[in-house]
Image (tube, rainbow, N blue to C red):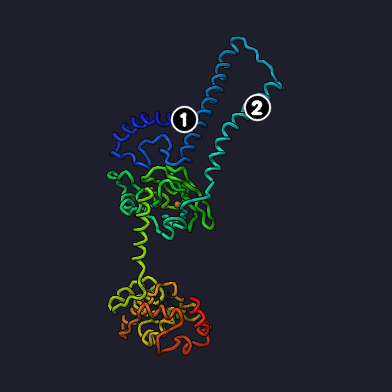
């Protein structure tokens, strides 16, 4: 059945040559769509091969039945036409005929259902995976988390190339590359010949994770977890798309899977882990004031400015940081404020920020606007503070000023120890 698909290739090539002479010279994208593609994508997994075979088997059976039934029908209409004096035969309640037209279709259905069921069951068998990756659909990108196996702990987001997006907006696609709207910043990288289990879920609306060359397509549903698997037998780049209409940018959340040899994959994982480690700050690093302030400015803009305003003046119940006694006071005061929050969470606690970010934002607020304390808080001091050891002086910031509405302050040492 495989050679039928290969025989169609010359046909599609002829069509492709004809089609591309009309528009610009877009070419086939290996692992992705082909110009004037008629057949399914060339399969690179066992399952996809089986799907091809099923597809052709069903198509051939249906064609044979179609031709057979219509041939008999048209022949009979023509042969036994009225002008020839044909008399209709009467075989009402013929047991033989009724048995035949029950049993024959039943056998055909069984012949079709048996191999289809086999493939379906194999498709659903996600056990014994070498690698488990969670694919999360977002409006409109994919997030990949390597949960299990080689590369465990890696996690990144894969977004459409911004150049392609701009090209789409401009409407001028005359220079569109072959991977137009399929190129992403961070492709999903997997090893060849390993069973990869993909767990799908979504963050907002229903998406669907589809890679035709692997023969996989699985809905990604918010609040639910579904899974599928593949074992790619050839290294290369394979492309797919979100296959569930998920909003106005649905066409802009492609899937790019890079299949590497086992050795290349190991090298890729090592490289990614190095990058990850480089991104993580060493909390024991000793910073100079200017660097910490520069970093803190970004942390402030990202986390604090929404409430306290870029000018540090706050608004209404949100107290100003510019000139605030807490900010100008002993370092411990402000460290308490950001680690524990204030006013029962009206000022949220910021313990999810890293020690370096906390040190930076505190140092920034203490040395910006009209605040010129010259005070500098090192990340290491936040490491200590999380285990309850605050710098000398100032004591608990919240307790003396806002004791009645600050029950959290009393529980402070316990809360800090729980870090
Ligand atoms: C959701 C809004 C919100 C965000 C975001 C926020 N704060 Fe606050 N912050 C408040 C409110 C409200 C208060 C006043 C609490 C009170 O009444 O004691 C406050 C008070 C403070 C105080 C004490 C000021 C004083 O004079 O009493 C400091 C210091 C502070 N915030 C720092 C920060 C830092 C640093 C960030 C960013 C990491 C931040 N805040 C983010 C709402 C916010
Ligand atoms: Cu989608």
- The residue that appears at 47% across and 90% down in the rendered structure is 400
Q: Secondary structure at mark 2?
A: helix
**Residue at the image position 41 percent from the left and 59 percent from the top:** 154
Q: Is residue 81 above or below residue 128?
A: above
At which x and y percent is residue 160?
A: 36, 53
Q: Which mark is residue 189?
A: none
- Ligand 1 is found in the corner quadrant, namely bottom left
Note whether 64 is above or below 332 in the view shown.
above
Q: Residues within 10 Å of mark 1 (few under 14, many from 20)?
A: few
Q: Position of residue 133 (x, y in %)?
A: 46, 54
Q: Quadrant of residue 372?
A: bottom left
| Cα distance between the residues tagged 2 and 1 | 27 Å
Q: Name the spot of residue 146 as percent of width and height, x first.
A: 44, 57
Which mark's residue is nearer the viewer, 2 or 1? 1
Tally of marks: 2
Q: Residue at x 43, y 60 (%)?
A: 153
For mark 2, what is the residue? 103
Residue located beneath label 1 in the image: 1
Q: Residues within 10 Å of mark 2 (few under 14, many from 20)?
A: few
**102 shown above or below 348:** above
Callout 2: CB less than 8 Å from ligand 2? no
Q: Is residue 318 visible?
A: no
**Could you tell me which secondary element the residue under label 1 belongs to?**
loop
């Amino acid at each position: 059945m495989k050679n039928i698909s290969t025989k169609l290739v010359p046909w599609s090539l002829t069509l492709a040559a004809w089609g591309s002479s009309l528009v610009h010279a877009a070419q086939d994208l290996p692992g992705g769509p082909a110009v004037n593609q008629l057949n399914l994508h060339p399969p690179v997994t066992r399952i996809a091969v089986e799907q091809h075979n099923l597809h052709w088997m069903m198509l051939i059976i249906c064609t044979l039945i179609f031709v057979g039934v219509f041939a008999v029908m048209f022949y009979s209409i023509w042969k036994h036409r009225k002008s020839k004096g044909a008399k209709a035969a009467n075989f009402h309640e013929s047991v033989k005929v009724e048995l035949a037209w029950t049993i024959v279709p039943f056998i055909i259905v069984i012949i079709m259902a048996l191999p289809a069921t086999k493939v379906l069951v194999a498709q659903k068998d996600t056990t014994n995976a070498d690698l488990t990756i969670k694919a999360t659909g977002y409006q409109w990108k994919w997030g990949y988390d390597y949960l299990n196996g080689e590369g465990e702990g890696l996690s990144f987001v894969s977004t459409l190339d911004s150049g392609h997006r701009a090209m789409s907006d401009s409407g001028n696609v005359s220079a569109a590359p072959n991977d137009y709207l399929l190129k992403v910043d961070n492709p999903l990288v997997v090893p060849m010949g390993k069973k990869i289990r993909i767990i799908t879920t979504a963050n907002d609306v229903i998406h669907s994770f589809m890679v035709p060359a692997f023969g996989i397509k699985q809905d990604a549903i918010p609040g639910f977890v579904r899974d599928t698997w593949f074992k790619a037998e050839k290294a290369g780049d394979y492309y797919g798309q979100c296959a569930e209409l998920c909003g106005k940018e649905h066409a802009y959340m492609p899937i790019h899977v890079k299949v590497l040899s086992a050795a290349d994959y190991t090298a890729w994982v090592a490289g990614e882990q190095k990058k990850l480690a480089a991104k993580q700050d060493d909390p024991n690093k000793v910073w100079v004031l200017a660097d910490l302030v520069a970093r803190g400015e970004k942390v402030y803009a990202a986390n604090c400015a929404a409430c306290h305003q870029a000018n540090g003046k706050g608004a209404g119940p949100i107290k100003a940081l510019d000139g605030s006694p807490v900010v100008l006071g002993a370092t411990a005061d402000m460290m308490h404020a950001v680690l524990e929050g204030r006013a029962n969470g009206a000022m949220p606690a910021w313990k999810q920020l890293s020690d370096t970010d906390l040190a930076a934002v505190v140092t920034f607020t203490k040395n910006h606007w009209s605040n010129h304390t010259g005070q500098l808080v090192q990340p290491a001091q936040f490491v200590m503070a999380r285990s309850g050891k605050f710098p000398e002086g100032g004591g608990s910031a919240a307790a003396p000023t806002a004791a009645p509405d600050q029950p959290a302050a009393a529980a402070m040492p316990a809360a800090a120890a729980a870090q």
